[in-house]
Amino acid sequence: MRTTGMGRSLAALVALVAVSGCTAQAVDAHGNARGKTPGNTQGSTQGKTPPSASQTDRSATPGDDKPGGTTPSAAPKVLWSRGDKGNDVREVQARLHQVAWLIPAPTGTYDTPTVTAVKGFQGKRGLPRTGELDAVTWERLRGMTHKPAAWELYPYGGQPAARPDPRCMTGRVLCVSKTTRTLRWMIDGKTVSEMDVRFGSQYTPTREGVFSVYFKSRYHVSTIYHTSMPYAMFFSGGQAVHYSPDFAARGYYGASHGCVNVRDEGKIATLFAQVRDGDKVVVYW
C-alpha cells in the first residue's frame, strides 16, 4: 500500500511539472500568436512572417552570394522608364520637382531630364542609379513628398477645361473655373475658345460669383501695384481678366492680386476684341 501511495504521488508531481511548462500566449486581432513560440530554438523562423519587399535589403553588392554572404534579392519591379507617358509619369515628375531633383515642369513624358533626375535621387540614397523608376525608388520618393495638387501637375497650364457651370449656358459669358484653372469664352452655350488662367493668393483671393464686364482697357496699368495689365476686362471692383507676362514666365509658382491672369497673349488679344461691356463673367469652383 505504501508503494502504491508513493507511485501515485510521483505521478501527480510529474503531471504538475508538465502543466506548469505551458504559459498563456497573447494573440493579435487576426488570431496569430504574438511573442515567442514555446519550443522554438534561437534562430528558428517557425511562425514568423517573411519580410515584405520594402523590408528586404536591396543594397547587396556583387559577391554577397559567396559562402558566408547574403543572397542578393531579386531586382525590384520597374514601374516607369524612358519613353513612358501618362498622368502617372506626370505625378512622378511633380514629386521629383518637390524635392528639387527635377527643375523643368512636369510634361507627362518620361524624358531625358526625368531619367537624370531619377538617377540623382537614387544615387543620393544608395540605390542603383538606373534612371528607371522601380518599386523601391517609388516608395522612397513617395515617403519624402506629398500628393501633388492639380496646379503642381500642370504648373504652366494645360489642364482640360472643366464642365461649364449651368450659369454659363446662356448669353455671352466668360466662364472661369477655379478647379481646372481655365477660362471658356462661350456664346449661347457653345465654347468659342479656352485658355489657362491663374488667380489671387489666399491673401488676395479672386471673388467667386456672377458679374459683368463694366470696363475694358487695352494698355491698363494698375494704380495700386503700378504693374502692367494689358487687355484688362474689369468685372468686380479692381479685379479683371488680363494678360500676365509673369504668369507666362512663372506659371502657377506665382499668383495675382485677385485678377484672373491669362498667360497666352495671342488668345487674350482675340478675346479682348470679342468681349463687350455687359458680357457676363462667372467665376466658380
Image: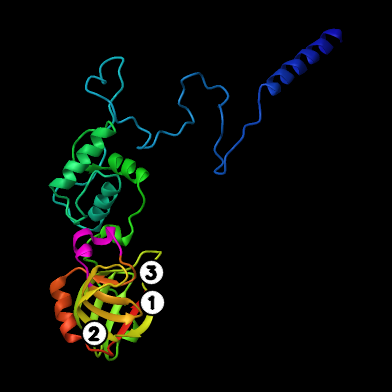
Q: In which quarter of the image is residue 88?
A: bottom left
Q: Quadrant of residue 282?
A: bottom left
What secondary structure is marked by label 1? loop
Residue 41, given in percent of the width and then of the height, sits at: 51, 19
What secondary structure is marked by label 2? strand
Instruction: Examine the rendered structure and indicate whether residue 2 appears above or below residue 53.
Output: above
Q: What residue type is labelled 3?
A: Pro
Residue 271, given in percent of the width and then of the height, sits at: 18, 81
Residues at circles 3 and 2 in contact by the CB criterion of under 8 Å? no
Q: Which mark is residue 208?
A: 1
What secondary structure is marked by label 3? loop
| Magenta stretch holds residue 246 | yes
Q: Nearest to the eye among marks 3 and 2: give it.
A: 3
Indicate which disc, 2 or 1, sits on the residue closer to the N terminus.
2
Q: Is residue 150 visible?
A: yes
Which colour assignment does the render follow? rainbow
In this rendering, would 145 be left or right of 2? left
Q: Which amino acid does label 1 sit on?
A: Glu
Instruction: Examine the rendered structure and indicate whether residue 244 appears above or below residue 90.
Output: below
Indicate which disc, 3 or 2, sits on the residue closer to the N terminus.
2
Residue 213, given in percent of the width and then of the height, sits at: 29, 85
Compare residues 9 and 235 and report the one nearer the observer. 235
Q: Which residue lies furthest to the top in this view?
A: 3
Q: Residue 205 carries which label?
A: 3
Q: In which quarter of the image is residue 30?
A: top right
Quadrant of the frame with the C terminus: bottom left
Query: What kind of secondary structure does the magenta stretch mostly adopt?
Result: helix
Q: Residues within 10 Å of mark 2 (few under 14, many from 20)?
A: many
In this rendering, would 3 be left or right of 197? right
Q: Marks 3/2: CA distance?
A: 24 Å
Q: Which amino acid does label 2 sit on?
A: Met
